[in-house]
Image (spheres, helix red, strand yellow):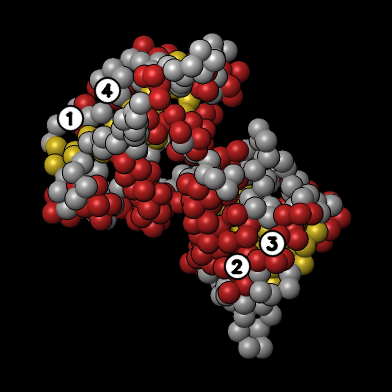
Amino acid sequence: MSSYSPFSKKDLLPQEEMLEIKKQKGELFIGLPKETYLSEKRVCLTPDAVGALTSNGHRVVIETGAGDGASFTDKEYSDNGAKISYNIEEAFKCNIILKVAPPTEKEIEYINPKTILISSLQLKTQSKQYFESLSKKKITAIAFDYIKDDHDSYPIVKSLSEIAGTASILIAGELMSGLNKGNGLLFGNIGGVPPTSVVIFGAGTVGEYAAKTAIGLGARVKVFDNSISKLRKLQDCLNAPIYTSTLQPKSILKALMRCDVAIGAVRGKNRSPICATEEMIEKMKEGAVIVDVAIDRGGCFETSNITTHKTPTFVKHGVIHYCVPNIPARYSRTASVSISNIFTPYLLNIAEEGGFENTARFDKSLRNGMYFYHGVLTNKTVADWFDLPFRDINLLIL
């Protein structure tokens, strides 16, 4: 070679082409323990979803009776390839654990170190000890209610909000009948009878589906929200023209005095704002119904107090209040199918990408939901709330 060439003879010889190494598909070992949280009847995977996972070579262990609350039998799961466990601890010994409610202190003791836990977070009901227990076992924990998709929305939260919105109107319809201390009114629009009047606070997903259901039943609907863009979007979504307004006390009072049903669905940043004061509720019709969907964040009505699925209502100022948190749990089978439809593609994608570590590296939505990575707290909200040390997830995953 001439002296001025930048390449050696070896450099100019034909070289082997370097190709990307094929990803090894990971085998998932998934555990589904039975829910022990009060009135929690949902389950993360339906028998059909288990069938989809087992047909792809994954193993699923389900604690006996895990699907009973959603009317899924052990036989249905077994027929789809799941192993039914009669030992409480066995489902907790799997590499990936799926739960609807977060595990209790006792359940965390059953979990093996370095396990992946996918459940809801329910930050307001947790203690500092819960996070310290996860940290000790170096657990990687993902809150499914924090998982954000490519469209910048929370798919599981949105799905459950759709159920809550539709359910709120159906529940109100039940409570209005004479059987439940109501006025004996039928929720609808019968010829010659004035239609039901509904007031909805909040134009988000819950408000949208509540409005759709109410309009479908023939009711007159009024929606209040302080976001003009949300109100415009709602008007575009609905086929029927509806009354919309910002949260102005005079307009709210006027609407509440005439309404048969009021739905509270404003979330707020830390707590739901009070949209209707006690004085306003005193002026509502005798036997009117309030369904406060936002009760888990404090509620939109000043008179709201938390109730349970066993005793869901109380009467104050002649108005029936339904203030049960976690309304989707009442429709456990629908909610379970909805959650399962979101989980199944995620789990299959994790396996396709070669396991959880690889997926977390490239999947931003999974990182959004992660609040513990190998025992290191990665969620700033949790860190601030409980005064715990925090590390950015993007600095831990390389």
Q: What's under tag 1, amino acid-wise? A: Glu
Distance from disc 4 to disc 1, alpha carbons, whole Å, reads 9 Å
| Residue matched to label 1 | 90
Q: Residue at x 63, y 57 (%)?
A: 207
Task: Read off the residue under disc 4.
Answer: 111
Residue 57 numbered tag: none
In the picture, measured across the screen, residue 267 lies left or right of residue 363, that is: right
Residue depicted at 60% across the width and 67% down the height: 212
Mark 3 in CB contact with mark 2 (< 8 angstroms): no
Q: Is residue 54 left or right of residue 321?
A: left
Whether residue 38 is visible: no
Q: Where residue 313 sits: x, y (%)?
A: 52, 51
The location of residue 248, given as percent across then percent down, is 84, 52
| Residue at 77% across, 50% down | 227
* Label 3 crowd (10 A; few <14 / some 14-19 / many >=20): many
Q: Percent x, y for residue 54?
A: 19, 47
* Disc nearer the start of the sequence (2/4): 4
Q: Secondary structure at mark 4?
A: loop
- Do labels 1 and 2 touch, CB within 8 Å? no
**Depth order, front residue of 331/45:** 45
Tell which circle, 1 or 2, labels the residue nearer the N-terminal end.
1
Residue 234, numbered label: 3
Which residue type carries mark 4? Answer: Ile
Q: Is residue 288 above or below residue 96?
A: below
Residue where numbered disc 2 is placed: 212
| Real-space CA distance between mark 3 and mark 4, rounded to the nearest whole angstrom | 44 Å
Point out the residue furthest to the bottom here: 192
- Identified by mark 3, the residue type is Leu
Q: Nearer the viewer, mark 3 or mark 2?
A: 3
**Mark 2: which amino acid?**
Lys
Question: What is the spatial separation of the Cα atoms under label 1 and label 3, in whole angstroms?
Answer: 47 Å
Mark-to-mark CA distance, 2 and 4: 43 Å
